[in-house]
Image: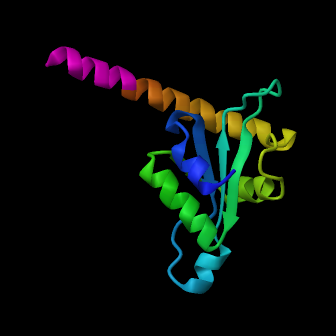
Amino acid sequence: MSLVSLALMPKSRHYLFMTEKNYHTKEDILKRKAVALKDSDRDTMRPDIVAKGRGFLAERILDIAFDKDVKVRQDKALTDILDVYDVNSPIPLEALIPVSRILEYVYQANALKRKEAEKKNRDI
């Protein structure tokens, strides 16, 4: 999947994992990794890896994620696991439990945001 495709997809289906946030030098930036996931359209019931990159490509993926208000999670261990798999493949089984716990939190946070927005709209 291209970065353009990633940028055009609905944000509610995206999740992004990355290594450390605070890189200041060019050498540090080259160490950064990012892996983007989306809900699967297949029977696997596992999210798919839709983009990944290192260095400046990881920075670009993160820029798109932040622009699209995609949930980003800093998790070096999980990012390292996901990074070895190909784009357009489902996440590996060993990553399923940690990813599902994180996605559960994301879904709950999104539901809370929707409820707060609905309440605010009713109060107006």
Q: Farthest residue in the top direction?
A: 122
Residue 74 percent location from the top left of the image: 59, 56
Specify whether residue 112 is painted magenta. Answer: no
Q: Position of residue 70 (x, y in %)?
A: 50, 45
Name the residue rendered at 69%, 58% in the picture.
52
Residue extending furthest left? 124
Residue 51 visible here = yes
> Which portion, as a residue range, is magenta?
114-124
Depth check, front residue: 4 or 50 = 4
Count of numbered tags? 0
Is 119 within the magenta?
A: yes
Kindly identify the residue that appears in the image at 86 percent across and 38 percent down.
93
Q: Residue at x 59, y 48 (%)?
A: 6
Q: Is residue 20 visible?
A: no
Above-or-below relation of 76 to 31:
above
In the visual, does 72 lie left or right of 32?
left
Q: Quadrant of the C terminus?
A: top left
What residue appears at the point 46 percent right and 53 percent down from the top-left corner?
Answer: 66
Q: Which quarter of the figure has residue 116?
A: top left
Q: Nearer the viewer, residue 39 or 103?
A: 39
Residue 92 falls in image quadrant? top right
Residue 105 x/y as whole percent: 56, 33
Secondary structure of the magenta portion, mostly? Answer: helix
Question: How is the rendered protein coloured?
Answer: rainbow
